[in-house]
Amino acid sequence: MAFTPTALNLPPYPFKITLKDNRHFIFDEIRKKHLVLTPEEWVRQHFIQFLILEKKFPKTLIQIEGGLNLNQLQKRSDIVIFNTSGERLMVIECKAPSVNITQAVFDQASRYNSVYKAKWLVVTNGLKHCYARIDHIEEKFQFSPELPQYLEL
């Protein structure tokens, strides 16, 4: 069974992809384990590498699929970035390339961030990336055309 990856609007990376029981797996270097290679995981792994290699985000400050309670429901955020003091800097919501980045998708990520109060909110489907800086005091956000380097956050 051949794996046909979707070309993303991110640099290519040399992932470790394996086939077992007719299912493809991708190695997640943050969690140090092989994960089922779904379209969303393909985007998440690319975006993680983009953060580490292009934007110089420290691996040790990246949390994947962290749990949170939202309106008494248990939810999972795709990626959360911390600073060295343990404060959440960024919440990243990853979608499959086939999922359009709509207001509903952005609202989902915003609800997660209402719990975290991170300064940055990112939504990506690997093809389109939305970067927003959040001002929690003024309850406003400003879109950014690019994601800053980690040390510029």
Image (cartoon, rainbow, N blue to C red):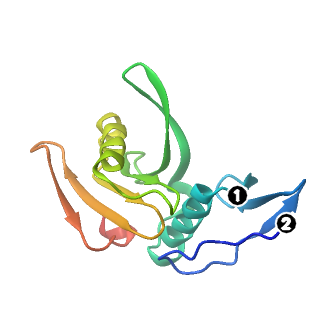
Instruction: State the image coordinates of residue 33 (x, y, percent, origin top left).
Output: 75, 53
Relative horizontal placement of residue 52, taking residue 110 as reference (left or right): right
Residue farthest bottom in this picture: 11
Q: Which residue position is annotated with label 2?
A: 1
Instruction: State the image coordinates of residue 77 (x, y, percent, origin top left).
Output: 48, 43
Q: At label 1, which amino acid type do we have?
A: Leu
Q: Which mark is residue 123?
A: none
Q: Which mark is residue 37?
A: 1
Relative horizontal placement of residue 36, taking residue 54 as reference (left or right): right
Circle 1 crowding by C-alpha within 10 Å: few under 14, some 14–19, many from 20? many
Give the mark, 2 or 1, whose residue is nearer the N terminus: 2
Residue farthest right in this picture: 21
Q: CA distance from mark 2 to mark 1?
A: 13 Å
Residue farthest top in this picture: 72
Instruction: State the image coordinates of residue 18 (x, y, percent, origin top left).
Output: 83, 65
The answer to whether 106 is drawn above or below residue 48 in the figure is above
Q: Which label lies toward us, 2 or 1?
A: 2
The structure residue drawn at horizontal position 55% and vertical position 63%, both measured from the top left corner, is 43
Quarter of the image with the N terminus is bottom right
In contact (CB < 8 Å): disc 2 and disc 1: no
Q: At label 2, which amino acid type do we have?
A: Met
The structure residue drawn at horizontal position 60% and vertical position 72%, both measured from the top left corner, is 6
The structure residue drawn at horizontal position 87% and vertical position 57%, both measured from the top left corner, is 22
Circle 2 crowding by C-alpha within 10 Å: few under 14, some 14–19, many from 20? few
